[in-house]
Image (cartoon, rainbow, N blue to C red):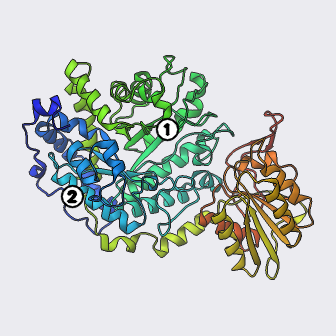
Amino acid sequence: MQNSPIRRRLAVATALALAIGASPMMAAAAEPAAARHADQRGPNGSAEQYADRMLESMTLEQKVGQMFILFAYGPTAEGEDARNTALYGEASAADIIEEYEPGGFILFSARDNVTDPVQVATLSNGLQEAAEDAGAGIPLLISTDQEQGLVTRIGSPATLFPGNMALGAGRSEKDTRKAAAITGEELLAMGIQQNNAPDADVNVNPDNPVIGVRSFSSDPDLVSRLTAATVRGYQDDAGIIATAKHFPGHGDTATDSHTGLPVITHTLEEWQQIDAPPFQAAIDAGVASIMTAHIVVPALDDSGDPATLSKKIVTGQLREALGFEGVIVTDGLEMAGVRQQYGDGEVAVRAIEAGVDQLLLPAAPQVAYAAIDEALESGRLTEDRIDESVRRILIMKHEQGVTQEAMVDVDRVMKTVGKRSHLRAAEKITDATTTVVRNDDDALPVAVDGKSVLVTGYGVATGQTLAGELTARGAEATAFATGTAPTAAQIDQAVAAAQNSDVTVVLTNNVSATSSQRQLVAALDATDTHLIVVAVRNPYDINRLGDVDGFVATYSYAAPALASLARVITGEISPSGTLPVDIRSTENPDEILYPIGHGLSW
């Protein structure tokens, strides 16, 4: 980087970060984020003026850096990690920022840079300090993927919700907006200004391995309404940037774009009716950012290129047809779906050519930077094209308020994160999502006080959490986890334990045609125990489990979902959630076993 042609040619200007009249690192004010940023979103053009002023002051290399969203291993900005050195040639996050001057940084636990809210806030401040010390002095946009439910990067003591499909079961735009507002407020308190949510995909494929419960529903209208509510909760109420994903729609695939390249076979008309409406709803709600998908959609572009690299899709459909004027960010460029056809450098260049503004998680950052450098040298990319994207990014940063107040007060983090009012709201919202799909022979509710209860099936922590909830209600509850692929020996152990239990709750997770979870449930159903089956992820499990008497869908194994499940099982609350998807017969897909809107109560 230090010896790149761009730096040699254009390392001349000093950024005018203070020219806007305020330090970019001033401490966050105490008033709500939406109020803090309101003046930046008015008609006075301050964001545009800031962007234009900064563009005039930046080197071309600094502009390119603004288009990258990077990460670093480790919980602190200054801490060194050999994995960073291998990837970047720099050992710490602070050194990476100094060398590459990225526009954004992403946090998630899989990279060992998230442990708890105070650590996240401390790391965020350290990252911003490094950005202030870098050449352009432009604050970072710090982001994460706190979708809630299945994709949750920051766990308890942060306030947790059961995720999108659960909210789809609740059907409440008010609750959905409130969940987003609480999530966004807590993220902002930790120094995270951009959430890669909501998932706006319409999950019309029950076998979808990557979306599933991350989607609100298989109904485009419901997905559209709840997507818009989420955007408003994040942006209007919490003052955090929302990112609708995964454009042009990842809901009808049986391939995971993390490991392969999915092909969506929808016709243009089907795409317009199914996949496009939620993104249009997000745009109409004012969403600041949209994430592209690494999927092939022949009806939109027959080249075979994934949407992330397709100008017909990114520019033609998202910019021109849907009228989106905000920031377009790629899904992770380290994912297999975008890397199958081109090298890591070519992928970065092609994404920019397609119309993308931000390049998230390049697999080989040095290669990607060098490829863009070369493309600029050759004239394949122009500085004007780079300016288009960087201007959008700078405007978004200024409207977010990060250019005025990037730092957070670490001492006040836990006054916001997981506070009592947030937890109460999460409990109330979650209680409205639990769905009883089948209740033959009065399988539910059941009095557990003084009874022996076995919790078995999926998840060590999941089973223990539910057993604890039932124990708190007077049961003698034990947990025996068998996982998602129980062995014959584990099934025999579960059956033996069930035969000595008054009540057995078996937790299932994505039951496939070949899953031994089917044998587990069948064996338990053949005992004399009072059996309740609970799908703690996709609700479709029931179509492979036969005629069990009691079947409940929670859409999540997060702690709040399990607490609500315990209240439903014991009759403390009456279930009110209804299915947000059709559950069809596996033998005859045209036969709907349980339609959207089905749900039992008492």
Q: Quadrant of the C terminus?
A: bottom right
Observer-nearest of 113 and 426: 113
SS at badge 1: strand
Residue 200, image x, y percentages: 52, 42
Label 2 is placed on what type of residue?
Glu
How many residues crowd mark 2 within 10 Å: few (<14), some (14–19), many (20+)?
A: many
Q: Is residue 391 visible?
A: no
Residue 181 on image: x %, y %: 45, 60
The residue wearing badge 1 is 246
Q: Nearer the viewer, mark 2 or mark 1?
A: 2
Marks 2 and 1, how far apart in space?
Answer: 32 Å
Q: Nearer the viewer, residue 176 or 306?
A: 306
On residue 5, the disc is none
Q: Which residue is mark 2?
A: 129
Identity of the residue drawn at 53% across and 58% down: 174
Tell me if 526 is positioned left or right of 9 in this view.
right
* Image-quadrant location for residue 364: top left
Q: Is 141 left or right of 597, judged from the image as shown?
A: left
**How far across and how far down the image is residue 536, in percent?**
68, 56
